[in-house]
Image (cartoon, helix red, strand yellow):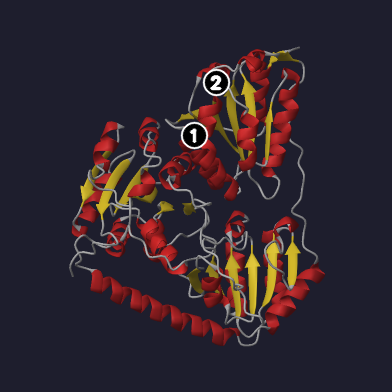
């Protein structure tokens, strides 16, 4: 019995447990859209821009741990999505990106919207391919799911020509093979690592997103306490891989090797777990480690071991199992109690200084991000899910929000902006029973503001919080860095083309135009009542918090 390739495509999704397609429809997607009525278990999540679709799918994959699917429209649509596909690649999201392609019989005629989609997608995906015949649909989709889920996971692109979707084939959909690659780490290797940890007088741990993905956060906490280690995050993270309020937590590492060296240089051993160590913004010639520092790295795949620098010992395998067994292998560690006490004292002093800073900024007008975040979190229930793209206010977000587990907080990788507002769509679809709080800067939000329509259209419980400093503040900080690092005296001082004013962005008006209620808040004492109004709505709501910018800091 034969079936059209479009049915084989959707059968492949069903076999792999796909329940959602995030997409922006187009003409060449009609075979897919028309066929979905025969597949009621697959929901089509409609977006108004291809970048929003891909970003929402990527965050959905992060929130569920399952392969997500995003559907684009021909060359311009795929082009619109490239930046977010890059973000999904950096985030290691298992993602199938498809695009409808023009009829292959017109390939030599240069049809409208036609282009080489595979060449466009290849640089930002693990594999890119076009289905040329109906008989190829099943094996290509099986391979696509397999490659997307091989570590390090990431996006795969499949072009679906409109005529090929109508080809009939006898080759039915087949599920990707179950390949177990997370093999246990040899006990002898763990014993070597444990010996190095026991011998350390000042250990540190740097955690990456794979710790959270492997559900290994509790084991890392136990390990840190067992050896008395300070714990750091990578600079940019998609997950909370260590509790932010734990006494051992020392925050995020800096944007260059010199800043990392400042944090890590006094440690005689650094244990790296589950990340692409390290992603830099600025070049510095130094190493992130002091000459005497021993480096131990633990990863899910040997492909990421010792990639950027040599290590004393590298281990690859099942992270969750390996970290738990490492805790046992370490045993009792001399000096750990004293180090844990020192970290507790240090954290208490830092909290005291942060509170003093908050008091000193309390009456600023416009309000500071620190005051805004303090008031916001105080008004929110404790079980919200955070989607964070606050960027320059990230430190204040970390100090106020306290994610309890790996599925309580999400962020974007790769550095491309617009991921917070768009990613919240995917997180809300994954966690329909929970309230999502998406915190974004105003500049970032404008990259994917169409997401508000999707939130309203699908009735998603998202509180969008826009921190409006009316500027690209991070770019101003980076301009300062550029001028300092390259000794440049700019005639365009202070900051050219980095203000978002004249006119001022009216986020509540934009939200209203897309079916989302919202309001502007300029008085920090009014934040609680605004949050109460937001939580009373069974759907999306937007609060625009006007905060001070870099150049205008208000008055004390």
Q: Between 20 and 395, which is closer to the camera in this rendering?
A: 395
Q: Quadrant of the N terminus?
A: top right
Q: Residue at x 35, y 57 (%)?
A: 473
392 in relation to 6, above or below: below
Q: Is residue 331 left or right of residue 416?
A: right
Q: Is residue 438 left or right of residue 44?
A: left
Seen in the picture, residue 555 relative to 467 is either above or below; the reply is below
> Residue 502: horizontal and vertical position, in percent?
22, 45
* Mark 1, secondary structure of its residue: helix
Q: Which mark is residue 80?
A: 1
Q: Is residue 451 above or below residue 213?
A: above
Q: Is residue 211 left or right of residue 297?
A: left
The C terminus, quarter of image: bottom left
Pick the residue in front: 263 or 191: 263
Where in the figure is residue 310, as x and y percent of width and height?
72, 69
* Neighbours of disc 2 within 10 Å: few (<14), some (14-19), many (20+): many
**Residue 490 x %, y %:** 36, 61
The residue beneath circle 2 is: 29
Residue 41 at least partly seen: no
Q: Nearer the viewer, mark 1 or mark 2?
A: 1
Q: Are marks 1 and 2 in contact (CB under 8 Å)?
A: no
The residue drawn where x is 44% and y is 31% is 47
3D distance between C-alphas at marks 1 and 2: 16 Å
């Amino acid at each position: 019995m034969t079936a059209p390739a479009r049915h084989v495509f959707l059968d492949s999704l069903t076999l792999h447990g796909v329940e959602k397609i995030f997409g922006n429809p187009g003409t060449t997607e009609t075979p897919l859209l028309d066929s979905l009525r025969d597949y009621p278990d697959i929901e089509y999540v409609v977006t108004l821009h291809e970048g929003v679709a891909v970003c929402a799918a990527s965050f959905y994959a992060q929130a569920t741990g399952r392969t997500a699917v995003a559907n684009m429209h021909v060359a311009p649509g795929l082009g619109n999505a490239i930046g977010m596909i890059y973000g999904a690649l950096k985030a290691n999201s298992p993602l199938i990106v498809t695009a409808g392609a023009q009829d292959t019989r017109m390939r030599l005629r240069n049809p409208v919207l036609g282009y080489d989609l595979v060449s466009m997608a290849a640089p930002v995906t693990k594999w890119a391919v076009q289905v040329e015949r109906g008989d190829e649909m099943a094996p290509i989709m099986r391979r696509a799911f397999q490659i997307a889920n091989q570590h390090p996971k990431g996006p795969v692109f499949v072009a679906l020509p409109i005529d090929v979707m109508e080809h009939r084939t006898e080759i039915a959909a087949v599920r990707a093979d179950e390949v177990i690659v997370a093999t246990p780490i040899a006990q002898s290797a763990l014993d070597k690592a444990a010996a190095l940890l026991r011998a350390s007088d000042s250990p540190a741990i740097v955690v990456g997103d794979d710790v959270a993905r492997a559900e290994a956060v509790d084991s890392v906490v136990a390990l840190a306490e067992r050896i008395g280690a300070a714990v750091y995050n990578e600079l940019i993270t998609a997950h909370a891989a260590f509790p932010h309020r734990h006494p051992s937590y020392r925050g995020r590492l800096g944007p260059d090797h010199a800043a990392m060296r400042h944090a890590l240089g006094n440690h005689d051993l650094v244990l790296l777990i589950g990340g692409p160590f390290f992603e830099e913004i600025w070049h510095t010639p130094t190493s992130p480690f002091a000459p005497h520092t021993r480096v131990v790295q633990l990863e899910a795949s040997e492909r990421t071991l010792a990639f950027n620098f040599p290590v004393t010992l590298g281990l690859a395998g099942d992270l969750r199992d390996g970290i738990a067994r490492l805790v046992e292998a370490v045993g009792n560690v001399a000096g750990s109690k004293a180090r844990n006490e020192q970290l507790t004292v240090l954290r208490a002093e830092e909290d005291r200084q942060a509170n003093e800073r908050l008091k000193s900024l309390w009456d600023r007008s416009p309000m500071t991000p620190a005051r805004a975040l303090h008031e916001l979190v105080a008004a929110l229930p404790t079980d919200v899910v955070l989607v964070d793209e606050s960027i320059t206010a990230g430190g204040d977000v970390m100090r106020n929000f306290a994610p309890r587990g790996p599925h309580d907080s999400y962020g974007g990788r790769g550095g491309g902006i617009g991921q917070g507002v768009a990613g919240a769509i995917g997180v809300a679809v994954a966690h329909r029973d929970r309230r999502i709080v998406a915190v974004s800067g105003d500049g970032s939000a404008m990259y994917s503001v169409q997401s508000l329509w999707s939130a309203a259209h699908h009735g998603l419980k998202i509180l969008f919080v826009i921190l409006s400093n009316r500027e690209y503040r991070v770019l101003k900080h980076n301009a300062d860095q550029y001028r300092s690092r390259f000794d440049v005296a700019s005639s365009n001082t202070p900051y050219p083309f980095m203000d978002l004013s004249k006119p001022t962005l009216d986020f509540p008006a934009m939200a209203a135009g897309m079916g989302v209620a919202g309001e502007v808040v300029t008085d920090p004492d009014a934040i609680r009542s605004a949050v109460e109004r937001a939580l009373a709505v069974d759907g999306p709501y937007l609060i625009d918090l006007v905060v001070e910018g870099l150049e205008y800091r208000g008055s004390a």
